[in-house]
Image (cartoon, helix red, strand yellow):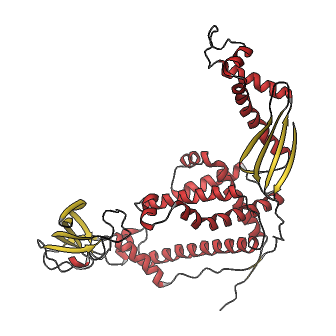
Amino acid sequence: MKVSVEKLQTNLVTLEVEVEEQQVEEALEKAYWQVVKKVNIPGFRKGKAPRQILEAYIGRASLYEEALDSLVNQTYPEALKDSNLEAVGQPRVEIVQIDSGMPLIYKATVSVIPEIELPPYKGIEMEEIVAEEPTEEEIQNVLNNYQKRMAHLESVENGTLDNGHIAQIDFIGYLDGVPFEGGASQDYSLEIGSNTFIPGFEEQLVGMQIGEEREIEVTFPEEYPQPDLAGKPSTFKVTLKEIKRKEYPAIDDEFAKDISEFETLEELKADIAKNLREKAQNSAKGELRERIVENLVSPIEVDVPEPMVEERLKEMITKFAQQLSIQGTTLEQYMQYTGKSAEDLFTQFRPQAAEWAKTTLVLEAIARTENITVTEEDVEERITRASQEFGMDRDDVSKSIDNVLESFKKEILLDKTINFLIDNAKITPAVEA
């Protein structure tokens, strides 16, 4: 096999590949045996027609097309390896020559990883980021959240509905005097002041008494996900059936015993402080990592391959859609009520995708220079850590990464490279304010 490389741009090349006649003939013979089993030719049992008869029946081009796929799939990776090139994305293949008794010649144009001129990356100077000690207010906020989870509801027999109460209501919504689809419910529990209903709805319920009926006038927001309701005024007839209020336990030693393995509130607070401290320390380490990478990557000029940016963009849009799904909406609904198109989203995320691609290329270049690699032990250790962090069965985690193993390994490689930069950085003590 002969390979020549023409550099079109800093990250775009064309490989001209010449495959010997014998390899072409072997591929044609293999293609013949694959195709002849599928074709019924009059006068011959299936799979028994000679090659000349098959070519005459289906056309030589069909046989060559079958062989061509096999030849390109086999020789293209070899051509990249022989040329010391790492491709990004799929190539655009152009056939120059293919005929019986002659070499196959084709051209493959593809984006490749560009050469990067690395600046000195050992000894990066960076000021230490000190994690702040947890405050009493932060500790109390955690206790308050625990308290809210332990709250129980009690019925309010007398009095009127107020903020913080849980109202059990029946309601019917009307547009121009006609009930609209999805606008009615019975025994619906609504926390007053939670702002989960249309703006103005909850406020107009304040002061109601059990058994009272009231008409509520509201206007749906312009960005409401249902176009037939967006921006339209409506009337709701509401009946208040029950009022409940949340009762919270006292935050004391008994409270600490109920929610933890500790005997006293002071022990629980000490544990909360410990967890907050660890969280702050991890956050400080994360920020230091980001600053070191940004300090290194920012001044480097890199001609990022477009397919790499496009692939990252797709990943980011997919992740964004998943986040919207968790919030109860779809990407299509989001675009509908924000007025954004798919092109707008790609434009919005493109700078982040391009920066990620640039950072990845620089870190991978350092990894190659320093012979940083990912071992099977690295993969197994990361799977174990992930299973512990997310409380999942280790085998389930292992199976979940089977389809994204290369991406998983790349994350590990980048992580190890950043650790290498930190280990070789000059971290100076923080200057006290």
Judged left or right of residue 396, residue 218 is left
Q: Which residue shows up at 45% across the image and 74% down it?
A: 268
Quadrant containing the C terminus is bottom right
Number of marks in the rendered image: 0
- Residue 246 image point, x, y percent: 26, 74
Judged left or right of residue 223, residue 6 is right
Quadrant containing the N terminus is top right
Which one is in front, 317 or 242?
A: 317
Which one is in front, 26 or 271?
A: 26
- Against 51, residue 12 (above or below) is below
- Residue 425 image point, x, y percent: 78, 73
- Against 391, residue 266 (above or below) is below
Q: Which residue shows up at 68% across the image and 12% down it?
A: 49
- Residue 93 image point, x, y percent: 74, 42
The reply to whether residue 245 is in sight is no
The reply to whether residue 393 is in sight is yes
Task: Name the outermost residue toward the top.
Answer: 43
- Against 353, residue 281 (above or below) is below
Q: Which residue shows up at 41% across the image and 76% down it?
A: 143
Q: Looking at the rendering, which quadrant does residue 358 occupy?
A: bottom right
- Residue 18 image point, x, y percent: 85, 37
Q: Looking at the rendering, which quadrant does residue 57 occupy?
A: top right
- Against 295, residue 105 (above or below) is above
Which one is in front, 95 or 38?
A: 95
Task: Name the outermost residue toward the left.
Answer: 211
